[in-house]
Structure formats: C-alpha cells, structure tokens
Image (cartoon, rainbow, N blue to C red):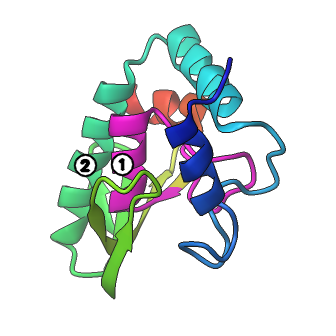
Amino acid sequence: MKNTQAEKDAYAQMKPGAITAQGFLGSDPRSFADIVESDLEAFRRARVDPDDAAAFLERLRDFGQKGLGEPTGVGESLVVTVGDARGVLPCPFHDGTFHKNSVEAVDERSGTRVVYSDLSIHLLAAHRFCQGEGSPFRLDPETLASMMK
C-alpha cells in the first residue's frame, strides 16, 4: 500500500523527537500505510470495528477519570487509571491538539494491559493508526478486542 504525501509528512512527525521524545513508531520499521493495513486486518480478524474500539477507549477513560488518579474498576475485570499532565499534544496530521494524559487499562482476568492517551484515541478514530510495534502507547488490535469482550 502506498503512502500519500500527507501520510509521508505525518510519518516524519511521528519519529522520535518531533512531537514526543519517543515518537509514535516504536521499533517498527514498516511504513505508515503498512502499519495501518496490518492493524486493520487484525481488527477484521477479531471482528472489531476500529470506531467501536475508539469509543470503548473513550468510555474507559471517562470511567477512569472519576477515580482522580486512583485505579477504578470497570465491569467485571478491568481496572483503569488516568493520569493528567499539563499541556497538549498536536496530531501529526495537523488536525487538532489533544490533552496530555495517560490512561492505563488492565484486564485482571488475562493480565493484558493497554496504555493510551486522548491523542491515541484520535489517531485510531480519525487515521486508523494504532502506532508502531514497540511504541509505549501502541493500541494492539488483538488486546483491545480481548478487553472489549
């Protein structure tokens, strides 16, 4: 799959040091388009719509914010902790800025864990980008699918 010029420009902003110290790509050597295509295929295999996954992450964040930084139980097995920081982060696609925060959701049944932010939710919902393998805020489609069940 080919990258558009906008994707190439955004990809440059995703590298370490451009927007965040660690960037959005982790150790993943693939192109933006290849990362997105692979993750969309994983969502299809798991029978999860990326928009539903983004909405799920928003709901977890909203529940977690009620805990004011303390772990908050959600449903039967999820525990969510939300931490806030001052400032905002711009989207690498230049289509908005997002509150700096960190959301950790842990499924106590399986031990799976996902860490994300408001920008992570936006990247998934608007650009279908889950971040590269090894990125600290990567939204692994299979992990999300297992948490949503």
Is residue 23 at all visible to an observer of this figure? Answer: yes
Residue 31: x %, y % from top left = 73, 36
- Would you say residue 122 sits in the magenta stretch? yes
Identify the magenta region.
115-139
- The residue lying at 64 percent from left, 62 percent from top is 136
Question: Disc 2 vs disc 1: Cβ atoms closer than 8 Å?
Answer: yes
Q: How many marks?
A: 2
Tag 1 secondary structure: helix
Asked if residue 15 is positioned above or below residue 74 in the image, the reply reads: below
| Amino acid tagged 1 | Ile
Tell which of 73 and 123 is nearer to you. Answer: 123
Mark 2 Cα-neighbour bin, 10 Å: few <14, some 14–19, many ≥20: some
- The residue lying at 19 percent from left, 58 percent from top is 63
Q: Which residue is mark 2?
A: 58
| Amino acid tagged 2 | Glu
Asked if residue 93 is positioned above or below residue 70 in the image, the reply reads: above
- The residue lying at 45 percent from left, 32 percent from top is 128
Q: Is residue 68 left or right of residue 2?
A: left
Q: Considering the image in quadrants, where does the N terminus appear?
A: top right
Tell me which numbered mark, 2 or 1, is placed earlier along the sequence: 2
Residue 32: x %, y % from top left = 65, 37
Question: Residue 121 — which label?
Answer: 1
Tell which of 92 and 102 is nearer to you. Answer: 92
Q: Residue furthest front?
A: 5
State the separation of the CA atoms marked 2 and 1: 7 Å
Mark 1 Cα-neighbour bin, 10 Å: few <14, some 14–19, many ≥20: many
Q: Is residue 69 left or right of residue 137?
A: left
Asked if residue 85 is positioned above or below residue 5 in the image, the reply reads: below
Q: Is residue 55 left or right of residue 66?
A: right
Question: Residue 146 — which label?
Answer: none
